[in-house]
Amino acid sequence: MKRTLGTCYYPEHWDEEIWTEDARRMAELGLTWVRIGEFAWSRLEPSPGDLQLDWLDRAIDVLNDAGLSVVLGTPTATPPRWMLDKHPDMIALDADGKPRGFGSRRHYCFSHAGFRAESQRITRIIAERFGHKVAAWQTDNEYGCHDTVISYSDAARLAFQDWLQARYGTVDALNTAWGNVFWSMDYDRFDQIGLPNLTVTEPNPAHAQAFRRFSSDQVVAFNREQVDEIRAHSTAPISHNYMGRVTDFDHFAVGKDLEIATWDSYPLGFLEDRVGASPEHQRAFARQGDPDFQAFHHDLYRAVGRGRWWVMEQQPGPVNWAPHNPAPLPGMVRLWTWEALAHGAEAVCYFRWRQAPFAQEQLHSGLLRPDSAEAPAMLEARQVASEIQNAPDVSIPRADVGLIFDYDADWAWSVQPHGAELSYFGLVLDHYRALRRAGLNVDILSPDTQDFSGYKIVLAPGLMHLTDELRAALAQTEAHVVYGPRTGARDADFKMPVPLPPAIAGLDVTVARLESLRPDSPIPLAGGGAVQGYLEEFETTATPMFTREDGQPIVVTDGNRTYNGGWLDDIGMDRLVAQLCETANITTRTLPNGIRIRRTETEEFWFNHCAEAVKTEIGTLAPASVTRRII
């Protein structure tokens, strides 16, 4: 697989006279891909039925004539103002019942039939017109960004009622599944069932989880409608650009209808508002980004795309939307680009070509300044473009370690976190960090995985509901499987199962009591480290691996099955990974803080995410740098 670069371009923002010059400069830079069109609906159809497509035809021709390949986005993330006049009830409502109105983007409800028909129509129009001229497609833009998956509109309520009837068949079955006898919550008809907001206190968690699943299904259906329209007129591969730590819909389910998964990588933008890092960590990596957050998403979308994935938007400088917006250290744009390529990205596209001098993103950097002079990132992009010319093709080996990520589990933890600071995403990311600190490659795995052949260790933390299929697949694998905490804690309808969890075949563990811990009250482990946030006490005859200082087991093992009943801190996680890898005969390293390694079939990459030089076993690594070695 060849490595390529690209950019995101908005020809509708600029005088047509400069398109040719822009295309020439892109080609001279060494770019291959240019994404366009994803926000252009008002220019494509300024009034209902008034199609103005010629300008987009000319823009595609200009780019193609320069040797550039076009990714065309469907423009459905930005419905024009006239659309609201036509469908005034198409906007989503938030949990307080307030409208998410016009004036920015993503102002629609996935359940609104009228808007979905309009989205299919405009997708059909552009697919018919441009299907033979473009090299790839993008559906919509950043599903879920700005908390736009879950809508409490009337359209969502009616669609949810239909979804429930299809799922449960009878209202009596629903009442039984949800335990609605509690607090006299029984329903007589499906049309009595509202949405799980504006209740006096918390809604039934089964109701809330069902609504999360329904909301995800609506995104999948909306995306599939666009895919079907495109495929009727084009053979080019179709993608969607996911956003970091947006978990309100199942990306694996959307990805099944696409050829390529892409995501939008903003390391500095994410550091404060998505990573969940301490103030000290944020200060240390303020101009570099977290050493593991981007890598986790690279591996996640490699799984979502079944091996084919890109970075569709790569941060090139300060952004405009984070709590604070520092500039990256010199070298970081190159590091971020190579990090994605080392994880198997087919393309890394910089957002954006030229900084906009108007509207909401005018403080968002590009490769060019608004006056078309080069911005600092251009030099680093040019360096990478030169370096990839002589780089070997990418071949990503299967890792020794697999880590399961389940969107349904994330919803369950969100519905019932049991502790203010607890999240499934955070738990999985902590496991991923520990594996990376040990110098390991990691494969993120879908919960639909049925064959774990080739893995020496499979980590399955926090899977509150284990499907029968996944439970059976994990029981059959020869890999060492690490479960917990909260494994199997609920059935498919959010009831506590009996026998009590985790009910893992071949592992005698019964969770007898659980608690969440205050952030200032960790429980020390014998031998170092601590349990933080969440703790289970269990009845077991399995062999203790880790215990509390009072002798109570925290991690127990029996053969190739291990159960971890606590959320371990970094020291505890590092101890657990080291012991598991020693048992599985996996070689680990002890890396300096901020240093990470990634291996392909032919290369080993050393990334220094620190603002200072760091001594390593291969020598002193410069600040904010990547070192490539042929292996």
Image (cartoon, helix red, strand yellow):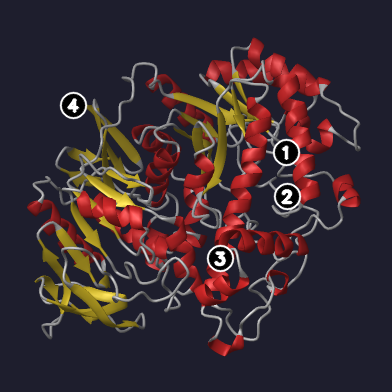
Residue pointed to by mark 4: 631
Tell me if I can see residue 113 in this picture. Answer: yes
Label 4: state its secondary structure: loop
Residue 437 visible at all? no
Question: Hey, which quadrant is residue 284 in on the image?
Answer: bottom left
Characterize the local packing of mark 1: few (<14), some (14-19) or many (20 or more) Cα atoms within 10 angstroms.
many
Q: Quadrant of the C terminus?
A: top left
Residue topped by disc 3: 210
**Residue tagged by mark 2?**
105
Task: Decide: few, some or many residues near mark 4? Use Cα within 10 Å; few <14, some 14-19, many ≥20.
Answer: few
Q: What amino acid is labelled 3 in the image?
A: Ala
The residue most toward the bottom is: 183
Q: Name the residue under label 1.
A: 39
For disc 3, the neighbor class at 10 Å (few under 14, some 14 to 19, many from 20) is: many
94 vs 587: above or below: below
Vertical relation: 609 (above or below) 525: above
* Label 4 or label 3, whichever comes before in sequence order: 3
Indicate the quadrant where residue 329 lies: top left
Q: What residue type is labelled 1?
A: Phe
Between disc 4 and disc 3, the foreground one is 3
Q: Determine the CA span between mark 2 and mark 3.
A: 27 Å
Q: Which of marks 4 and 1 is in front?
A: 1
Tell whether label 2 touches label 1 (CB within 8 Å). yes
Marks 1 and 3, Cα distance to the nearest angstrom?
32 Å
* Secondary-structure class at tag 2: loop
Say which residue appears at 83% left-offset and 33% top-offset: 43
Observer-nearest residue: 595 or 62?
Answer: 62
In the picture provided, is 556 more to the left or to the right than 307? left
